[in-house]
Image (cartoon, grey):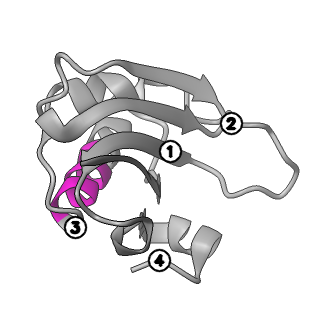
Amino acid sequence: MSVRAIRGATQVESNTAESISAATQELITQMLESNELTANDVISVLFTSSPDLDAAFPAAAARTVGFENTPLICAVEIDVPGALPRTVRVMAHVESARSKDEITHIYLHGAKSLRRDIAQ
């Protein structure tokens, strides 16, 4: 097993706790499924939110899908003019037998525009 980083992002419908939670849960679930991982394989997760998302912590949503004992932290993304609004970004550190080239990074909804080269 090796330690790998998995990136992901999603655009949230609106700045509500429900929207942030649903989008975060969808993103985390797809990151795990696409890489054939469980929550137990995850070492830690860093979440960032665009400055316009302040209704909830993405980490709180992750705790509801199996990350109760995983170190999680949230931060605010740099407020770059013209950046994609309502965006949650993730970098998860995991234990995986996959090589770096075999890791699947997940970009959903409007966040697909951030990484057209690897978005689903």
- What secondary structure is marked by label 1? strand
| Of callouts 4 and 3, the N-terminal one | 3
**Residue situated in front as seen by the camera: 67 or 52:** 67
Q: On the rendered image, what quadrant is the C terminus found in? A: bottom left
Q: Which mark is residue 88?
A: 1
Distance between mark 4 and mark 2 Cα atoms: 20 Å
Residues under numbered marks 4 and 3 in contact, where contact means CB atoms less than 8 Å apart: no
Q: Main secondary structure of the magenta part?
A: helix
Q: Which mark is residue 34?
A: 3
Residue 84, above or below 78? below
**Three-letter amino acid code at the position of disc 3:** Ser
Q: Label 4: how many residues lie within 10 Å, few (<14), some (14-19) or many (20+)? A: some
- Mark nearest the camera among 4 and 1 is 4
Which residue does the image show at 18% across and 39% down from the upper left? 41
**Three-letter amino acid code at the position of disc 1:** Val
- Mark nearest the camera among 4 and 3 is 3
Residues under numbered marks 3 and 1 in contact, where contact means CB atoms less than 8 Å apart: no
- Mark nearest the camera among 3 and 2 is 3
Residue 7, above or below 75? below
| Of callouts 2 and 1, the N-terminal one | 2
| Of callouts 3 and 1, the N-terminal one | 3
Residues under numbered marks 2 and 1 in contact, where contact means CB atoms less than 8 Å apart: no
Distance between mark 3 and mark 1 Cα atoms: 18 Å
- What secondary structure is marked by label 3? helix
**Residue 28 at what x, y percent from top left?**
28, 48
Q: Which residues are magenta?
A: 25-33
- What secondary structure is marked by label 4? loop
Q: Which residue is mark 4?
A: 119
Magenta run includes residue 98? no
Q: Which residue is mark 2?
A: 77
**Residue 71 at what x, y percent from top left?**
34, 18
Q: Is 3 displayed left or right of 89 in the figure?
A: left
